[in-house]
Image (tube, rainbow, N blue to C red):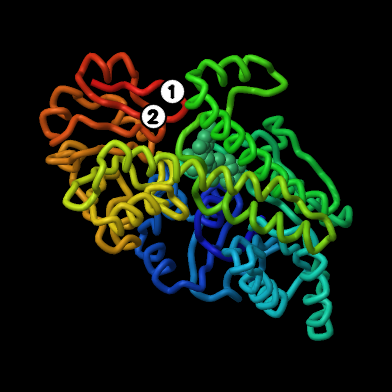
Amino acid sequence: MKIGVIGTGHVGLITCVTMSAVGHEVVGVDADPEKIQILLDGGCPFFEPGLQELLDRQITEGGLRFTDSLPMAVEGAEVVFISVGTPPRASGEANLIAVENSATQVAEAATDDLLIVEKSTVPVGTAVRLRTTIERLRARSDGRIEVASNPEFLREGHAIDDAMEPDRILVGVESTWARDRMRSVYAPWIEKGVPFIETDIATAELAKHACNAFLALKISFVNALARICERAGADIEGVTTTMGSDPRIGGAFLRAGLGYGGSCFPKDLAAFEHLSKTLGYDFRLLQEVARINDEAVDAVIAKVKDALWNLEEKKIALLGLSFKPGTDDVRFAPSLRIATDLIDAGATVVGYDPVANNVAANDVPGLLVADGPYEAAAGAHCLIVCTEWEEFRKLDLVRLKDEMAYPVIVDGRNIFDLDQMEAAGFTCYSVGRRSVTQ
Ligand code: UDX
């Protein structure tokens, strides 16, 4: 099947490479000339494990190409995915202008029957808006144009695996014609036995927001528990192990730490809460989820200030700058707020991240970056773990202590074993766990 993909970001580009990997003929387009030039030159606009290799293979095998012309991506396509950005407005409401413009341009370029599919996470009711917009254009085109919803469930750092081996595929459709087209698109997955959930469009749009909101809720719940554990002298990991052993709760997404960042949870929660309000329901629980998430970062910053007394003339190292391991994405990353706050307080802040150094340094004025964890730690009065990259769990603690001015660690992601910290002579403050002081 010929498929067009509008928007080649973290969702669209994964859609391009995986849809072509299963045999579809895919054309991807992006309005950002820089991004599309990188792709036309065979590069990758962002880091995602395995993406460059799959991109190389699919372009070589010919099932995938890129263009800066949207009509070329639409020409001959039976399905066009809209995977453009939906950034938050100041109010928290999702800004859907890119979705509207893309769908309008797609409808105008359509020369045959076409199914336009919402891949970006959008508030419930967006498809109704799209249908109205397209109807206004239909006077000028006689092909059948319908809208469907097909939310993505990709985790950055695991996006290709999540796309190739999804827990489920969700499609929202309003006709058997649209349903059949989506079944054709996903035939390779359906044949593998991947659960294929078919709903109406509004249900699919809302289910996506519900999933992300609930995952964020689990994280904030455990971070609130960590505050209580710290005050009660209890251990958050013993609590979450106990919770997770109940299959009704499940152990995933119960890791206490600096909370969630990324381009999805913060934005989707704000959009879902705003959307609920416009429907007349005050979803105050989501406000609490966001408040507790901010509080998780405040708590780590407070630990640093408490450990170091005055911050002027202090040097602080940040281990990890991306919002999570496996990506160079720093959007809403806790590390950025921590760096900004400490720099504003007069400290010198040096960060190290395996892939996000430059992206983070561009985002935070005054943030210095180092080529490795030990270089970042050199002369540091405190080291803060912001992202739980695997390599940080294997650091040589003797060498690390020798590099630092003070042996003080604030472990924002609970990656270090506290007995090892004690034995190595560190003072270590972490999240919901006992403090180790020398
Ligand atoms: C998320 C959803 O998982 C995915 O289904 C959706 O399509 C997009 O949003 P992503 O934002 O890439 O994916 O990352 P995810 O792995 O879900 O983690 C989100 C954030 O929560 C990260 O900042 C992570 O550090 C944090 N997190 C996750 C915790 O703080 N504790 C946990 O236990 C799990």
Which residue is at the front of the view, 357 or 398? 398
Residue 161 on image: x %, y %: 52, 37
Q: Which mark is residue 430?
A: 2
Residue at the spot x=27%, y=20% of the render? 421
Classed neighbour count for the residue bearing mark 2: other residues with Cα under 10 Å, few (<14), some (14–19), many (≥20): many
Residue at the spot x=31%, y=52% of the render? 342
Which residue is at the front of the view, 308 or 187? 308
Relative to 284, does residue 112 appear above or below in the rendering? below
- Distance between mark 2 and mark 1 Cα atoms: 6 Å
Disc 1: which residue: 433
Q: Amino acid at mark 2?
A: Ser
Residue 339 on image: x %, y %: 32, 52
Q: Are marks 2 and 1 in contact (CB under 8 Å)?
A: yes
- Mark 2 residue's CB less than 8 Å from ligand 1: no
Q: Is residue 273 left or right of residue 337?
A: right
Residue at the spot x=59%, y=48% of the render? 290
Which residue is at the front of the view, 275 or 342? 342
Q: Quadrant of ligand 1?
A: top right
Q: Is residue 42 left or right of residue 68?
A: left
Q: How many marks?
A: 2
- The reply to whether residue 287 is in sight is yes
